Amino acid sequence: MSTPENPRGRGGELVPKVYDGEIMTGTDDKAATADRRPVAVVRRAFIDCTGRLIGRVRESGRIARWRGLLAYRARKLPADVVRLLWFLLRGHGRWIVKAWTWATYADLRSDARQARMSGDAQARREAQETIRADAKARWAKLGIGLRRIVISAAVLTVVLVLLALVEMLFDRADMPGWLVTVYQVRDFGAAAVRVTVSWLAVLGPLGWLVAAVWEGRDRTPGAGWLTQPDRADADSWVDERMISRALAHLGIAPMNAFFKNGGELVYLTPARKDGDGTAARIRLPLGVTADMVADRRPTLAANLGRASLETWPTKGDEDGVLDLWVADKGTLQGGAGDWPLLQDGAADVFDGVPFGLTQRGLIVNAPLLEANWLIGGRPGQGKTSAMRTLLLGAALDPTAELWVYVMGESPDFEPLKPRLSRYRMGMDDSVAADAVAALRDLTEEMERRGRTLGAQPGQPPKVSRKLADNPRLGLHPLVLAIDECHELFQHNKHGKQAEELAVRLIKRGRKYGIILLLATQSPTKDSIPKEITRNVSCGVAFAVADHIANDGLLGAGRYRAGIRATELRMKTDRGTCVAVGITDEAWELVRTFYVTFEDGTDLVTPVVARAMALLAEHGRPVALTAAPANEQPAPVDHLADIADVIGGEKRVRTQTVLARLIAHNPDEYNGWTLTDLSAALAGYGLTPAKSHGVMVIRADDAASALAAREDGETGEDTGSRGVLPEAGAAQTPPADLGKRHKGRQQRSRLNTPENPGERRESATRPDSLPGSADDG
Ligand SMILES: Nc1ncnc2c1ncn2[C@@H]1O[C@H](COP(=O)(O)OP(=O)(O)OP(=O)(O)O)[C@@H](O)[C@H]1O
């Protein structure tokens, strides 16, 4: 080995310098082989082992972290000591306050004060009585405790003095056995007390100090400050302490006061990992509501070191309960990935179809059965794609039938065409007319399904998978999707009807496997009827401009409750939506799956091809519901309707008849005027008559016209049943009219119970209505 003075070793070779305390890991082999004495061998082995150990220690990241942590705490030691001293002082202060509160009944008096301030005399009286009763009880308890101690001490002293006197007079050897045992117990007790007292002299003050520091500790939960060197790991770590601190700096006055007075937040659910983030449920202090926190979302997000979109303060079960979900940093930026059914697989509409990934990183199986959807957002944010994904899912269920209406020029659904039994796209009125016809057909289909269900054994309350599988029943899932639906609801001619029919379907179609999917850019109260917004079960909002659009899609009060799609950024958050009703949670932040159909990439067509193959495999046609798209609805029988609305009355004012007709069949009669009614009556050879100065339609006349028409029809062949009679075609009714047309006959009979003969006569003279003698 060389020395600093002699860098050359014993053999004259150059060897590195060695300083005191340096561990020689790379010991010179030659030197090692040279010295084979046992001491030198052991020394070399020791050096070798420790060297390796240190090397390993250096490699271990965990230990390195601990070393870093300890070094950090060592640096912080002076500050920690000051902090502990402060806790010690504050602990004593808090004890004094507690003792004072106890002695002066400050707690009880504050109840009384609150009652007085709220002007509740009864509560105040009760609080004062409680003070009196409680105060007595408190001191009484103290007195009883003290008395017990004094009595016990006196008894013990007497016993000990007696024992000492007896021990002075008698030798222990002469004492009876039981007395000796008593002395032994006394001696043992005395020894125990001595030991305890000697320990207490040391442990007592120490315990006192610890208890005082504990009492004076920071009341914010968690002991993160002990181990958390800095906020470098705040990306994935949100604990109660961080949340409390973030809430304490929101600038909400009652919250500030609460923290200033040493208040502690109650964590109904402590911060815990929840998917790709952290969730906590917090009871807020007096005077603070969850809405107030939601309103300060950007500040809260900044305090937690997150983006606004990653911070979700929402209202819990009550206004004073805050549900907070904070995403792990950056996790919401990635897309949802490939749609699970993109390459293979089928879907079952009864189980839902894959729609997207929630903030918890779970796949949402979107409910379609017993659900209706309203999807909205600003242009280009992913509404149509989301609707298409839902339809693609439904297409992979061979029992589902799909109808699509696009109220604009857009090719988004073109590739689905082979799988759609009804499809119209465009901006012209005929598309709106067809969409309304589809809604009307669906309402009729709904009635039919109601009857079919009612006829099933056990009268099942709703369509089940088993019933849907039976093609003869026609109870399969039927999905109607309308893209840009605001164009339809705002249509000057068809809008009103569309609204009424859609509302009826949404309210009642649920049980019958009829599903409505609506997408819109414009979810305002003018463009989407309120009844629709109120009744859809699944609301989906992509980025929206304001709280009106937000609540239009997600339901009233959602914005205030912190469920806000306004936080979603145009473009940046394209494909991400806030949804309600699609899971059991109050809301979900969903990154929707995207099945590409743009820029020459078409992943939709292969899925549709698979859907077609599935249909073929199950032997199911594309169109299962009877009415083909171009079928004209049966013409409305105006005469029958007029007779119907006259009901059991002898005559009814023309205005009333018109109003009743509109109520009876708004689709047909909305927009009719008295002139239209007169024209229709004239078509049957009827003219309104004057009675008591007003124009009326007589029940007799209507019945006669009907009877005359029926009579004429019996002579015709069946192919002409729908043809309306000519004006002059009213003929004498046959004598057996009542027998063959029970419903009409009953109505006629009710119309003129007192004079059936006259009725028959008047029916022979349809042109004699004005000024008819029977009006008197
Ligand atoms: N889930 C998604 N993931 C990624 N990109 C998406 C997603 N959804 C939509 N996009 C992108 O956004 C574009 C617009 O989508 P889409 O046509 O569905 O929007 P929109 O809201 O219906 O627009 P508009 O109101 O103009 O009809 C798509 O072409 C696609 O590039």
Image: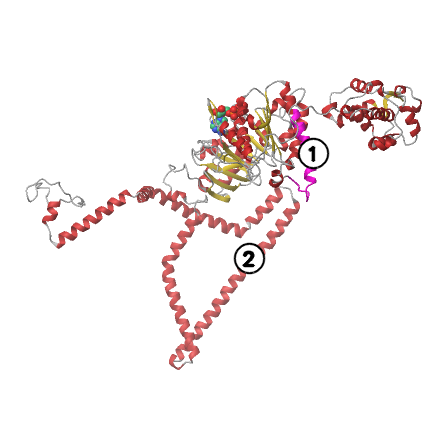
Q: Is residue 650 left or right of residue 33?
A: right
The residue at label 2 has a CB less than 8 Å from ligand 1: no
Q: Residues within 10 Å of mark 2 (few under 14, many from 20)?
A: few
Q: Secondary structure at mark 1?
A: helix
Decide whether residue 445 is among the magenta residues: yes
**Main SS, magenta residues:** helix
Q: Is residue 306 above or below residue 761?
A: below
Residue placed furthest toward the bottom: 174
Q: Amino acid at mark 1?
A: Glu
Q: Which residues are magenta?
A: 436-462
Q: Which of the pair 775/312 is nearer the observer?
A: 775
Q: Residues within 10 Å of mark 1 (few under 14, many from 20)?
A: some
Q: How far from the left and from the top, in percent, is residue 79?
A: 35, 42
Q: How far from the left and from the top, in percent, is residue 679?
A: 80, 18
The earlier-in-sequence mark between 1 and 2 is: 2
Q: Which of the pair 339/522 is nearer the observer?
A: 339
C-alpha gap between disc 1 and disc 2 = 77 Å
Q: Amino acid at mark 2?
A: Trp
What residue would you read off at disc 2? 139
Q: Quadrant of the C terminus?
A: top right
Q: How far from the left and from the top, in percent, is residue 331?
A: 44, 34
Q: Is residue 746 above or below residue 44?
A: above
Q: Is residue 342 left or right of residue 55?
A: right
What residue would you read off at disc 1? 447
Q: Secondary structure at mark 2?
A: helix
Q: Is residue 164 above or below residue 335?
A: below
Residue 68 in sight here: yes
